[in-house]
Image: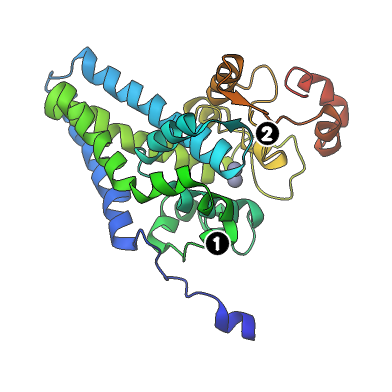
Amino acid sequence: MAAAVSAPPANNVGKWSTPLTTLFVLVLPPLGALGALATLVMGRVQGVHIALFLGGFVLTGLGITIGYHRLATHRSFETNPLVKAVLYILGSAAVEGPVVEWVANHMKHHINADREGDPHSPRDGLLHSHWGWLTQFAEIEAEKYASWTLRDPVARAVSATFIIWVALGYVVPFLIAGWEGFLWGGLFRQCAVQNVTFAVNSVCHRWGAQPFNTNDLSRNNWIVGILGLGEGWHNNHHAFPVSAYHGLRWWEFDLSGIVIRVLEAVGLVKNVRRPALGQIQRKLYVPAAVNLYERVAS
Ligand SMILES: [Zn+2]
Ligand SMILES: [Zn+2]
């Protein structure tokens, strides 16, 4: 069939090729995490190292969740070019690829969620959905799945300078606190942020509650909800991809959503998208539960 002939080969690598991705994403960060734990055992860890880890985790994590995901991919709010650039730079330092490529892969996931063409569904194996898919990078189809980012000068500029922001993510903690700073604020922090992101792709398509009928395997997982700065409320997200808030009930802690509220309150973001109560009711398996959603709905 013509379609089969024209399809890209399974191992067709993108700009961030398989060996490079494997080296940076699957090998170096876990080694750095082990190194960081070794410094802990040796009694060389101080408050500054923990602060670099936690501060770096939250900042670069929000760069992914608010910048790459809710802004660049789903356009769930609007902001000015400076705030956008800061968010994309922080996201770049999480070392999950340039923003244009991340958006393309993630939109491909939404469009094909848990079906043929999903880059990282656990239907192809839990390990595949967490790490394995990164070693089989299919061609990055930015024109098809992320055309608006290709037209966005900020997304293009930060993507083109990606390697600089990755490097700063190591250099800054090193300059602040030496090699322990490099390990805790650099590699260990990178390992933690990446694996939380990967857990959204793996854990949140396998374990958790599914209040919404989304025709995929997406789940709300409270552990990833907390660790993932709100991204673990993933069934909510698949039900309402353009919602700026993933936590839709009062107990669904969504740090990224809270930060977006604060940025909105001080005038740095506008046109924040949220689902209407009627939309929520239509997608719920138990429509009567809609009264639990009144706080967030528009
Ligand atoms: Zn998903
Ligand atoms: Zn998404």
Q: Is residue 239 shown above or below 120?
A: above
Report the residue marked by disc 1. 143
Q: Using a 10 Å C-alpha cutoff, classify the residue at mark 1 as few (fewer than 14 neighbours), some (14 to 19) or many (20 or more).
A: few
Q: Which residue is mark 2?
A: 243
Category of crowding for the residue at label 2, using alpha-carbon neighbours closer than 10 angstroms: few (below 14), some (14–19), many (at least 20): many
Tell me the CA gap for discs 2 and 1.
24 Å
Q: Find ligand 2 in the image and state its quadrant.
A: top right
Q: Most extreme residue toward the bottom, as rendered?
A: 1
The residue located at (46%, 36%) in the rendering is: 64
Image quadrant in which you'd find residue 63: top left
Relative placement, left or right, of 165 versus 193 is left
The residue type indicated by label 2 comes to Ser
Q: Determine the secondary structure under disc 1.
A: helix
At 56% from the left and 33% from the top, the residue drawn is: 232
Badges 2 and 1: C-beta atoms under 8 Å apart?
Answer: no
The quadrant of the rendering that contains the N terminus is bottom right
Does the beta carbon of the residue at mark 2 sit less than 8 Å from ligand 2?
Answer: no
The kind of secondary structure element at disc 2 is loop
- Please report the residue visible at 86 percent of the width from the left and 31 percent of the height from the top: 278
